[in-house]
């Protein structure tokens, strides 16, 4: 189903951002420890490729599976009780804990995965603080990265280097992979351009051959450069 969805998007009449996939193995019964470990090993083995577009190489998919798997808790099989309200989010064996981890990853647009693994509490707290904030030009430059999706690996390399600067300075990175499901694609891009102070163009044959880039994105970038010094 994942592969069919990705293939279908490739046949759309305009370029769309890559869809990241976040597998969530559900209803794992901790009382069946050996079986649950076997199934987690299988998820790790067979779904490893799914993670390659958004997790660092030194982070194992198994680690994220352990942190985001909602455990099976019989109590919550009855009625409409909400685990986050009933149990809270501090118990690593609870549903609320797994839900908060997943919510934080989504709120952070699947970024800074190394920080999530190293200090889960700090990461989730940061996601809560940042959830309703918008880029502020006074905080420093927002960098708009323009690229063709066939060159995604080069965009990833660029962002890896820029992210080092982002940790020590007030610097924000944006590319179209940050557009959330359900958001208006065109308006999200326009908003990002309006907030950007720097644009980086990864020019390649595919970039120059793209109708969307040539007729829509590139003219907008050049106009912003002329009008306000982007």
Image (tube, rainbow, N blue to C red):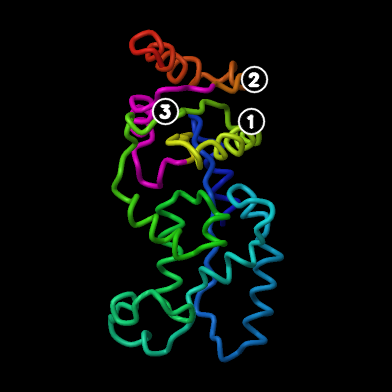
Q: Quadrant of the N terminus?
A: bottom right
Mark sitting earlier along the chain (3/2): 3
Q: Is residue 167 left or right of residue 225?
A: right
In the image, farthest residue toward the right: 45
Which one is nearer the viewer's eye here, 205 or 84?
84
Residue 192 falls inside the magenta stretch: yes
Q: Position of residue 113 (x, y in %)?
A: 55, 54
Marks 1 and 2: CB-CB under 8 Å?
A: yes
What is the spatial separation of the Cα atoms under label 1 and label 2, in whole angstroms?
Answer: 8 Å
Q: Residue at x 54, y 85 (%)?
A: 29
What is the spatial separation of the Cα atoms under label 3 and label 2, in whole angstroms?
Answer: 25 Å
Identify the residue under disc 1: 151
Local SS, label 1: helix
Q: Is residue 35 left or right of residue 127?
A: right
Instruction: Determine which quarter of the picture holds residue 220.
Output: top left
Q: Looking at the picture, does residue 29 appear above or below residue 7?
A: below
Q: Residue at x 40, y 53 (%)?
A: 107
Q: Position of residue 106 (x, y in %)?
A: 43, 55
Marks 3 and 2: CB-CB under 8 Å?
A: no
Q: Looking at the picture, does residue 65 appear above or below residue 110?
A: below
Identify the residue under disc 3: 141
Mark sitting earlier along the chain (3/1): 3
Provide the residue span drawn in magenta.
Answer: 178-200
Marks 3 and 1: CB-CB under 8 Å?
A: no
Marker disc for residue 204: 2
């Amino acid at each position: 189903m994942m592969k069919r969805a990705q293939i279908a998007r490739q046949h759309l009449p305009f370029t769309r951002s890559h869809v990241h996939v976040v597998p969530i193995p559900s209803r794992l019964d901790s009382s069946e420890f050996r079986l649950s470990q076997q199934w987690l090993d299988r998820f790790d083995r067979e779904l490893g490729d799914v993670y390659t577009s958004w997790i660092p190489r030194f982070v194992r998919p198994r680690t994220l599976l352990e942190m985001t798997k909602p455990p099976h808790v019989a109590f919550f099989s009855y009625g409409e009780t909400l685990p986050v309200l009933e149990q809270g989010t501090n118990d690593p064996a609870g549903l609320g804990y797994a839900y908060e981890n997943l919510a934080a990853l989504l709120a952070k647009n699947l970024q800074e995965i190394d920080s999530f693994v190293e200090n889960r509490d700090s990461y989730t707290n940061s996601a809560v603080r940042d959830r309703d904030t918008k880029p502020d030009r006074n905080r420093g430059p927002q960098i708009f990265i323009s690229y063709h999706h066939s060159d995604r690996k080069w965009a990833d390399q660029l962002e890896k280097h820029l992210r080092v600067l982002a940790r020590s300075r007030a610097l924000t990175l944006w590319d179209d992979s940050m557009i959330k499901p359900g958001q208006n694609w065109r308006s999200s891009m326009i908003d990002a351009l309006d907030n950007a102070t720097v644009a980086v163009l990864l020019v390649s044959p595919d970039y120059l051959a793209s109708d969307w880039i040539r007729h829509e994105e590139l003219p907008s970038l050049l106009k912003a450069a002329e009008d306000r010094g982007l």
